[in-house]
Image (spheres, coloured by chain):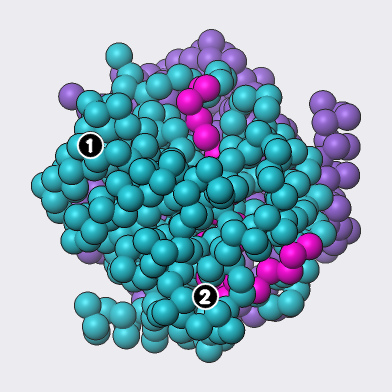
Chain colours: A purple, B cyan
Amino acid sequence: MSPRKGNLMAVRDDIKVIDATIRDGGLCNNFAFSDEFVKELYKTNIKSGVDYMEFGYKASKNLFRESDFGKWKFCNEEDIRAIVGDNISDMKLCVMADVGRCDFKTDFLPKSESVIDMVRVACYIHQMPAAIEMIEYLHDLGYETTCNIMAISQVGLEQVEQALEMLGGSSVDVIYLVDSYGSLYPENASALAEVYLAIAEKYGKLVGFHAHNNQNLAFANTIETLSYGVSYLDATAMGMGRGAGNCAMELLLGFLKNPKYNLYSLLTFIENYMLPLKEQGVVWGYDLQYMFTGQLNRHPREAMEFTAQKRNDYCEFYKSLLDNF
Amino acid sequence: MSPRKGNLMAVRDDIKVIDATIRDGGLCNNFAFSDEFVKELYKTNIKSGVDYMEFGYKASKNLFRESDFGKWKFCNEEDIRAIVGDNISDMKLCVMADVGRCDFKTDFLPKSESVIDMVRVACYIHQMPAAIEMIEYLHDLGYETTCNIMAISQVGLEQVEQALEMLGGSSVDVIYLVDSYGSLYPENASALAEVYLAIAEKYGKLVGFHAHNNQNLAFANTIETLSYGVSYLDATAMGMGRGAGNCAMELLLGFLKNPKYNLYSLLTFIENYMLPLKEQGVVWGYDLQYMFTGQLNRHPREAMEFTAQKRNDYCEFYKSLLDNF
């Protein structure tokens, strides 16, 4: 029997689509989205059937100066409410908080006073105890929580399993498989997803997937892991996100068979808001420099620098990466 | 036991990489490549470890006027020889011939007099008898042959199996699974590949895969079908090909673990020859209009027209496609 869940024709009711455009896309423009952009995206997501919209980061104001970034780096309660009011829609709202780069004990209101529904705790694998401390604190405040363990492609399977067991014993609701470097192929993304799912199911947790498009595999890996039982799926309008970007929302919504999801509003949003961003010179998406770092399973920082410098001497760049392996 | 063959670390000696840049890419620029371009690509492919290079079509000069197209629409023997001499390299050469649009009985020399090694016979499924007639003729002339059954995503499984059985009884060497509309997902591409492989192996034939990138899945589908045993893999420099294009050679060569394949020469070729093509306004590659036709499993002709008109009213276009379903 196939270990896949459901099939290409059917609806999987457990699926949740998370729009991460402002959060991961914000890394491309320093979070400088206009209120109009964010408000239109909010309305678009509701009409498209999106389940969660991520507004940005809850970053520490002690570590980052507010004047250096757009407001979605900090996601003040009043800034979110200026967009969504009391969010009377069925769509839930979330923010991301990085372990070690947020002041979670001072910056989160009790859930009963906040319009935020879910907090996504992002960490590296060596930060599991700190992540779990945050998760418990935020859970006690009343929030849904996820744990997004980043850069998983550089971690041995034994460590991954230990981290998953630790999360199994925590209050976390969703455990995310995060392909930070865009280095996973569908074959190993789905194999890893099965490891996550086996442990998560044992503890009654759900599993999510966050892709990067370095090898043009963000959508492919998303639907492959989905087919094995992953249910929280991150995507962004036109794949906007750091470096090579993420899974494109339009590909994902066009793929999902649940009639609650539809493309029309998103297409209009893309025409009116995403194409102008591209024209203004905001850059993201698949290109060879990101392919290299994906193939080599490493952080895209050099590729981002290559992009910023508008270089196209791919061969020299590739050689320099191999020189610094 | 997994039905996959090999694993992500190992070499599969049965793999053959086919560069189809001039042939499928020629559909983007009316085959108007300079001799310098083709010669540099030929040298690049040899250095990159590519196994076959496809030069173009052998189209009927009775149906198509030679003055209306670049020379690679016709692939005259002397034009190929002007590039490759006697092709003393280890790389083999191939051309494509469409059933019903070539004069195979007059336009092919005996293999002993030609520098061409393999002829790829492209057809639709209702043309199987005509395809097999061509295959037998070309096989008797001494060529390796493939049969590329196009638009397979619109054909029922029973018909596919009948066609594969017919080809099993023929002299064809390789049977191609062709995702003409870019509508296959990795999950059904690999399921179809298993159908092809089961019948092909029964008759001692090999299986190839030709992708289109309408849903950004060309590379994903190529490596997924490969993992189940497909061994002839089509790719093009920067994915150049009709509409959304094909599987990018740089992604494929970066993925394959056989040390005979390497990226360096291709990267230099891309810098010196592919980027200038893009700058000259030759257009190909993933965009939303192609995503729609892929999702809807239909011919990209309306999307190509949308592209040619430089439109970006995606929502209107999508509605018009649904109106004409």
Host chain of mark 2: A
Residue sitting farthest toward the top:
A158
The residue to which callout 1 is attached is: B168
Q: Are marks 2 and 1 in contact (CB under 8 Å)?
A: no
Residue B215 versus residue A240: which sits nearer the camera?
B215
Give the alpha-carbon distance from disc 2 to disc 1, as whole Å. 48 Å
Membership of B20 in magenta stretch = yes
Residue B236 visible, this orientation: yes
- Start and end of the magenta stretch? B12-36
The picture quadrant where one finds residue A171 is top left
Residues beneath discs 2 and 1 located on the same chain: no
- The vertical placement of A175 against A40, above or below, is above
- Viewed as shown, does residue A297 lie left or right of A68? left
Q: Residues within 10 Å of mark 2 (few under 14, many from 20)?
A: many
Residue at image position (39%, 67%) is B102
Q: Chain of mark 1?
A: B
Query: So how many labels did they put on this image?
Result: 2
Which quarter of the figure has residue A309?
bottom right
In front: label 2 or label 1: 1
Q: Residue at horizontal 22%, vertical 26%?
A: B202
User: Looking at the image, is A230 positioned above or below residue B115?
Assistant: above
Q: Is residue A279 left or right of residue A4?
A: right
Pointer 2 residue: A270
Q: Which residue is drawn at the image coordinates 59% and 15% (left, top)?
A: A156
Characterize the local packing of mark 1: few (<14), some (14-19) or many (20 or more) Cα atoms within 10 angstroms: many
Magenta stretch holds residue B267: no
Q: Secondary structure at mark 1?
A: helix
At which x and y percent is residue B301? 39, 77
Q: Nearer the viewer, residue B146 or A42?
A: B146
Q: Amino acid at mark 2?
A: Ile
| Secondary structure of residue under mark 2 | helix
